[in-house]
Image (spheres, grey):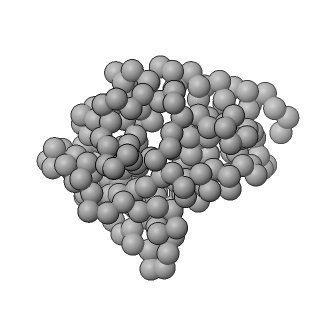
Amino acid sequence: MIQEVINKLASPSQLLRRSEVLTRPCPVPRENGIYAWYFRTIPSTIPTDNCYDIGGLKLLYVGIAPAFEGSSATLRSRIKMHLCGNASGSTLRLTLGCLLSQHLGLKLQPTGPTARLTYAGGEDVLSDWLQQNAFVCWVPYGQPWEIESGIIRSLSLPLNLQHNELHPFYRQLSVIRHNCRKEAKQLPK
């Protein structure tokens, strides 16, 4: 079953950009499943040698919805969170913002009464970058948490951390994210 899902993610019938996902009616189903992010332009520090490539778009990240049984998250809600949310609710946005901070002028910082770490006014800048460079596809799957680790371990996904400790970029990305969080937590609230 894992290979069948990988085949669908590696040869998607469609790859949608942000504006296409945010249309009404939304094309992303309210179902459980696995989604994959392909990118056009990426920082040169990200190794992509063994990543799936579709016409110059590189598969760099895979996520699931929901993350566990009983959660109300769906493919639609998770994909929209990555496209319109903030770094505190989206691991993908957190990671991309850390990697693109100098290029886009982003700074992770505590915001609001709970001091959540977000890019504050920079979230719109990150959303614009996603519109230009990110494409998503998905595969409905009833219990995605059961196959998530197998999929991640079977692919070269430099932007995934969970289940991806053997990837050559894992340690570097972990340090980059740690340093961004550490610096943000030292800022005044």
Q: Is residue 11 above or below residue 103?
A: below
Picture residue at 73% right of the left edge, 40% below the top: 105
Q: In this rendering, would 129 be left or right of 120?
A: left
Image spot of residue 67 (x, y percent): 39, 48
Q: In this rendering, would 6 be left or right of 67?
A: left
Image spot of residue 27 (x, y percent): 39, 72
Picture residue at 83% right of the left edge, 39% below the top: 189
Picture residue at 47% right of the left edge, 69% below the top: 20
> Is residue 143 something one can see in this rendering?
no
Image spot of residue 155 (x, y percent): 28, 35
Image spot of residue 33 (x, y percent): 31, 56
Give 30 or 70, whichever is nearer the viewer: 30
Picture residue at 24% right of the left edge, 43% below the top: 147
Q: Quadrant of residue 159?
A: top left
> Is residue 37 something one can see in this rendering?
yes
**Farthest-out residue, right:** 188
Q: Is residue 28 above or below residue 186?
A: below
Q: In this rendering, would 105 be left or right of 53?
A: right
Q: Is residue 176 above or below residue 130?
A: above
Give 109 or 97, whichever is nearer the viewer: 97
